[in-house]
């Protein structure tokens, strides 16, 4: 009787091992490098960043010039005039810091513009990954470009080419062997 119970137990609960999870991985950095839209977005983001950095540097130069002028004329100024100019310099420094926060801070203009330009591209990639995962019956898909560290990867589990094909960016001469 005990043998029958153990056999039935393993038949019922042992079937879970038959449905092993399938997994694969992709390299989103490689995929994004292949996308012309992403390159355009990165170029635009870079141009905006350079322009904002130049604007901040110009503001800083003006503050430094004001400070140098104050140092040069300090002996000729009255205490009230010196305090007035010092207050003006501090006010400009606060404005600079606020502008830096507004542009490059968390949730700043740079962050928002980057998100605006890259989100549609990332959505395309995630949709393609979802489609490939469903077609290949994958349960888990890792991104080796992210924080996940993979010590060893077997190329037969690399589904990057399938995602590129889904996005229409695959090499037509490339033969996928999965």
Image (cartoon, rainbow, N blue to C red):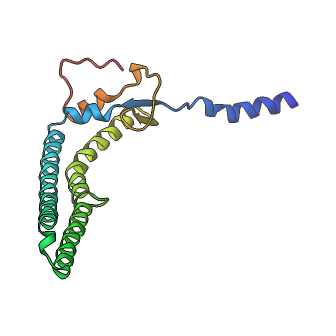
In the displayed orientation, state which residue is furthest to the front: 75
152 displayed left or right of 92: right
In the picture, which quadrant includes the N terminus?
top right
Location of residue 83 with respect to 1 vertically, above or below: below
Q: Nearer the viewer, residue 112 or 31?
A: 112
Q: Nearer the viewer, residue 8 or 63?
A: 63
Residue 103 horizontal/vertical position (percent)? 22, 60
Residue under the point 18% across and 17% down: 173
Count of labels shown?
Answer: 0
Location of residue 108 with respect to 24 vertically, above or below: below
Residue under the point 28% across and 27% down: 161
Residue 52 horizontal/vertical position (percent)? 15, 55
In the displayed orientation, state which residue is furthest to the right: 1
Q: Nearer the viewer, residue 172 or 90?
A: 90
In the picture, which quadrant includes the C terminus?
top left
144 displayed left or right of 47: right
Q: Quadrant of the rendered structure where residue 15 is?
A: top right
Residue 128 horizontal/vertical position (percent)? 29, 39
Q: Quadrant of the rendered structure where residue 153 is?
A: top left
Residue under the point 26% across and 55% down: 111
């Amino acid at each position: 009787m005990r043998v029958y119970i153990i056999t039935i137990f393993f038949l019922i609960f042992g079937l879970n091992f038959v449905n092993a999870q399938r997994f694969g991985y992709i390299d989103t950095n490689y995929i994004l490098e292949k996308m012309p839209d992403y390159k355009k977005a990165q170029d635009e983001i870079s141009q905006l960043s350079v322009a904002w950095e130049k604007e901040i540097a110009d503001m800083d130069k003006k503050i430094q010039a004001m400070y140098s002028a104050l140092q040069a004329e300090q002996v000729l100024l009255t205490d009230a005039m010196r305090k007035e100019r010092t207050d003006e310099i501090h006010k400009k420094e606060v404005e600079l810091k606020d502008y830096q926060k507004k542009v490059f801070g968390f949730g700043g203009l740079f962050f928002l513009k980057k998100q605006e330009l890259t989100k549609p591209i990332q959505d395309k990639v995630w949709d393609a990954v979802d489609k490939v995962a469903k077609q290949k019956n994958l349960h888990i898909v890792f991104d080796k470009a992210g924080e996940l560290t993979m010590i060893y990867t077997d190329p037969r589990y690399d589904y990057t080419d399938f995602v590129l094909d889904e996005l229409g960016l695959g090499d037509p001469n490339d033969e996928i062997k999965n």
